Amino acid sequence: MGLFYRKSVKLGPFRVNLSGSGIGYSVGGRGFRVGKSSRGRNYTAFSIPGTGVGYRSSSKGSGCLILLAAIPASLALSHWIFTSLT
């Protein structure tokens, strides 16, 4: 097994991830998150909070506009998922 390092800093719905391969960022809440990895790949992640079950899809390309457009949708979806599970 290889040694790795990762640190995550949360700023409200925003998250900055620091790793050995660079800096990544994402926005979202419990259950839904979109972001850009430290290797430059855009990703969308869905999960069922508290279960460890989820799905992550990634692609190459420019995702800055996708992230900005996804902020309201991700907040609404994460709020809906959180309130329906509690």
Image (cartoon, helix red, strand yellow):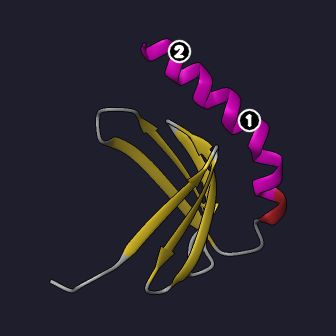
Looking at the image, residue 45 sits to the left or right of residue 5; the answer is right
Q: In the drawing, what numbered circle is on residue 61?
A: none
The answer to whether 14 is drawn above or below residue 43 in the figure is: above
Q: Identify the amino acid type marked 2.
A: Thr
Q: Magenta stretch?
A: 66-86
Q: In the drawing, what numbered circle is on residue 73?
A: 1
Q: Quadrant of the C terminus?
A: top left
Q: Identify the amino acid type marked 1.
A: Ala
> Which residue is rendered at x = 43% and y = 16% of the image?
85
Among numbered discs 2 and 1, the one appearing first in the sequence: 1
Residue 70 placement (x, y as % from top left): 75, 45
The residue nearer to you, when weighing 86 against 56, is 86
Q: Quadrant of residue 40?
A: bottom right
The answer to whether 6 is drawn above or below residue 85 in the figure is: below
Give the SS element for disc 2.
Answer: helix
The residue nearer to you, when weighing 23 against 41, is 23
